Image: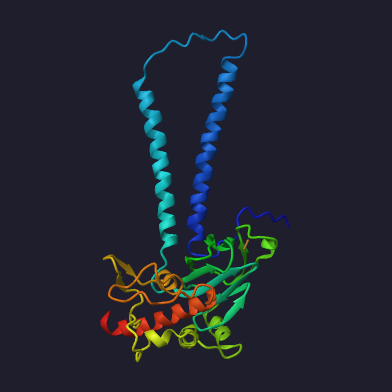
Amino acid sequence: MFNFPLWPQQASAQARQVDLLYIYLLLLSGAITFAIFLLIIYFSVKYRRGSTAIRTNPPRGHNLLEWTWIVVPLGLALFTFLLGAVVYIRMERPPSGAMEINVIGKQWMWKTQHPTGQREINELHVPAGRPIKLTMASQDVIHSFYIPAFRIKQDVLPGRYTTIWFTPTKTGTYYLHCAEYCGTSHAEMGGHVIVMDPADYERWLAGGSQQQGLAQEGAALFRQYGCSGCHGTNATVHAPKLEGVYGRPVPLEGGHTVVADDQYIRDSILLPRKDIAAGYPPIMPSFQGQVTEEDLLKLIAYIKSIGVAESTGSQP
Ligand code: CUA
C-alpha cells in the first residue's frame, strides 16, 4: 500500500492546533506566491517585445489603491500574529495540575526522572490523557527536546531550566529526537516516548526496583551536601528557613522581590551572590561544579515538598 505521510501522527492535545496554524500559513503564503506568479505572467505577456502596450507610465495618484495595499497586508500580518500568539501562549503555560517530569540532556543521551524516582535513559513513559510538564536542563551544551508526534520542541540549555508541556492523547510509541546539533553523536541522541493507559502506567511505576521519591532523595542530599547544617530546623547559623519558601515571593537585599521558583533555587545553590535574601549575611558558599544537574533537581524537589507541606494549610 502506498504510504507517504505528509504529517507525523497527531498524538497530543495541541498537535491539531499546531497543524491548523501550519496549514493556514501554507495556504496564505501559497496564495500570495500564486498571485505574484500570475502578475509576472500577465505583465510578461502584456509588455513583451513588440506589443503595443503604452509604456509612458504617466504618474497619477490612486488613494484607494494605496490604502488597500497598506491595510490588507497589515491586517493579514496582524491576524497571522494573533493566531500564532494564541497557540504559543497555550503551549507556554502548563496547567497547574500537570504531572512534572525532569529531563536532563547530555552528550549524547536523554535522562528522565519521574516524581516517584523512576529513572530512564532515552525513554519516557507517560500516562495518556494527563498534562505532563517537563523541567529540562543540560549538563553540557545546548540540546533540543523534540517529539514530532506531539508537536513540541524546546531548547535545553546549560545553566538554566526550560519547560514544556503536553497532553498525550493516544497510547503508542513515538520518536524523541535531539533537534539541536550538539556534537559527534547528535544524530543518535534520541529515543522513544511510550504513552500508556493510566492503569498500565501505574503498573509500570510500581514495577522495577524499589525507588525512593525524588523529594526523599533530595532530602538525603540536603544532609549530604551540608545544607541542613545552616538551613535545617535546629541550625544555629542565621540562614533563611526553606520550609514553605517554594513558590512564594522572597524579599531581596536591595529592595526588590523574586518568586522562589526552580530557577531561583538553582541560582541560590550555584550563584549565591546573585540574589541575597534581605536580612541575611552573604555567607552561602557556591556549589558550582559540585552538584550535578540531577542532584540539583532532587534538591529542588525536596525544597518544593517542604514548601507544599507548609502551604497546604494556609492556602486553598
Ligand atoms: Cu543533543 Cu543534538
* Image point (69%, 63%), residue name: 185
Q: How many marks?
A: 0
Q: Position of residue 305 (x, y in %)?
A: 40, 83
* Ligand 1 image-quadrant field: bottom right
| Residue 168 seen anywhere in this rendered image of the structure | no
Q: Nearer the viewer, residue 60 or 146?
A: 146
- Relative placement, left or right, of 182 versus 30 is right
Residue 259 higher or lower than 87, as above or below:
below
What percent of the width, then of the height, locates residue 127? 52, 76
Name which quarter of the figure residue 34 lies in. top right
Q: Is 223 located above or below residue 136 in the figure?
A: below
Q: Quadrant of the C terminus?
A: bottom left
Q: Is residue 38 visible?
A: yes
Tell me residue 277's x, y (percent): 32, 73
From the viewer's perspective, is 299 left or right of 240? Answer: right
Left or right: residue 141 compared with residue 4: left
In the image, is residue 39 above or below residue 179? Answer: above
Q: Tell me how the rendering is colored.
A: rainbow
Residue ID at (40%, 54%): 86
> Which of these two is toward me, 225 or 138?
225
- Residue 210 in picture, x, y percent from top left: 57, 91
Where does the N terminus fall, quadrant-wise? bottom right
Q: Is residue 77 above or below residue 175?
A: above
Q: Nearer the viewer, residue 48 or 179?
A: 179
